[in-house]
Amino acid sequence: MRLAEKLKCDTVVSEISTGQGTVNFKINRELLTKTVLQQVINDGSKYGLKSELFSGLPQKVVVEFSSPNVAKKFHVGHLRSTIIGNFIANLKEALGHQVTRINYLGDWGMQFGLLGTGFQLFGYEEKLQSNPLQHLFEVYVQVNKEATDDKNIAKSAHEFFQRLELGDTQALALWQKFRDLSVGEYVRIYKRLGVHFDEYSGESFYREKSQEVLKLLDSKGLLQKTVKGTAVVDLSGNGDPSSVCTVMRSDGTSLYATRDLAAAIDRMDKYNFDTMIYVTDKGQKKHFQQVFQMLQIMGYDWAERCQHVPFGVVQGMKTRRGNVTFLEDVLNEIQSRMLQNMASVKTTRELENPQETAERVGLAALIIQDFKGLLLSDYQFSWDRVFQSRGDTGVFLQYTHARLHSLEETFGCGYLNDFNTACLQEPQSVSILQHLLSHLAAMAHKTLLIKDSPPEVAGARLHLFRAVRSVLANGMKLLGITPVCRM
């Protein structure tokens, strides 16, 4: 009580009272309203990021995500990696860091032995040109099937890969064609997803550098030969079999782990990063622990700047045509289901490009449903849950953004000059200001009417809704969602 008497009210605090063991302050609401709204409007897309919390030095951040295998399925795990990795990269960028986005393709390894042999047997040039991902996948499936029964095919696949490793020009030319056509397809499809990469690298890039890694490990006395002729690194130092990592096949060719070591060293040389983040499913947790540990014992202290962001597995994602084989299947499915949902709404008929809107709303639905669970939890995929419009869903976010946008379009010209904050003192207005959330705004724009309100009130409310829309759009963009203005 005595404390409360000593405190004075000022322009910020309008009332001081005491409760049992507490002192309560009431903030000057008009000042709160004015300050928040002005800041939202002035900061625009930077609102919420200009905090002392984020004022550290800008860092160089490398994010490796998505990383599908050429000629194999683009499965749901790659989709999750793409969504999560894109968000991490967006967030780091928004905080002022210099971000490099890397797609590290599975474009090397025994699968290309099979693919090279398979294409010589079952491939068609025109199919390859018109739909590379589909055709390479079909060839890969077919040659795998044949190779199980026919030892000669398996043998020539092995020979083809060895020719690649040795740099045979004909084999490499075919491989290069597969890779270039696939990357071209990926770029086009990622664009639909609203995702871009600064670099498409791949395991192939490190085939020579991984030989250097093996020499380095050997010179440090870390390489051990096994009875089978492979080379391993014992990370426990006492022969514990669970911490032995194989780094070379018996024929001298490199493995996934060796290539990852070479890639990390190369990226450090190239980007001099402060942090490097790998976004892959939790099944690769041990692999990355071993890679980081090997970098450490090779003498690279920066290994501690590397981190793996693991995520849970998604089960049961099917399209109407069957199992998901390509990312494009998912995008087409989202678009067609969303168009169907929108067909019943009369405003859809007035849209200039319903396909594009359907894709954007559908992607928002997919992204939000993916972010709702815990990162490490596995979950069962459900299209019904993706397209729910009530609750915290992507469809609802897009709908709110579009509604608020149409308010601005309808009334914007007359009211958006100066505004009087005294007109925003209803509890609902204050609540929106304290939260700037879409559910509150969606309910409030039915009751905080603009039409038929006095000009001053209408103008103030319009400013409020405009601020909400701006914050909503910023948040959506961080998540990798493109806000729509009509739906």
Image (tube, rainbow, N blue to C red):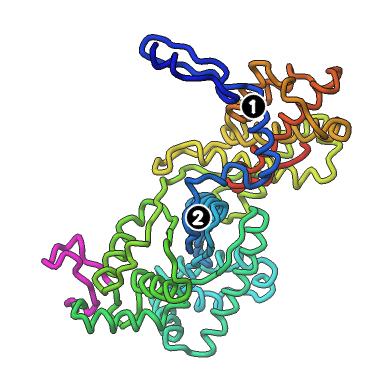
- In this picture, is 115 found above or below 52? below
Residue 13, numbered circle: none
Magenta-drawn stretch contains 244: yes
Q: Crowding at label 1, few (<14), some or many (≥20) Cα neighbours within 10 Å?
A: some
Q: Which residues are magenta?
A: 226-246
Relative placement, left or right, of 156 versus 294 is right
Which residue corresponds to the image point at 58% horizontal and 75% vertical from the top-left?
Answer: 178
In percent of width and height, residue 104 lies at 49, 66
Q: Secondary structure at mark 2?
A: helix
Query: Could you tell me which residue is drawn at 72 percent across and 30 percent down?
Result: 465
Residue identified by numbered label 1: 31
Q: Nearer the viewer, residue 192 or 451?
A: 451
Q: Residue furthest top?
A: 20
Closer to the camera, 256 or 170? 256
Task: Check disc 1 and report its element: helix, strand or loop.
Answer: helix
* Nearer to the camera, 95 or 121: 95
Sooner in the amino-acid sequence: mark 1 or mark 2 = 1
Percent position (x, y) of residue 220? Answer: 21, 80
Above-or-below relation of 338 to 324: above
The answer to whether residue 159 is above or below residue 25 is below
**Could one spot residue 237 in this view of the protein?**
yes
**Magenta-colored stretch includes residue 235:** yes
In x, y percent, where is residue 457?
79, 21
Q: Quadrant of residue 258?
A: bottom left
Q: Is residue 141 visible?
A: no
* Tag nearer the camera, 1 or 2: 1
- Amino acid type, mark 1: Leu
Q: Amino acid at mark 2?
A: His
Tell me the residue that label 2 is attached to. Answer: 78
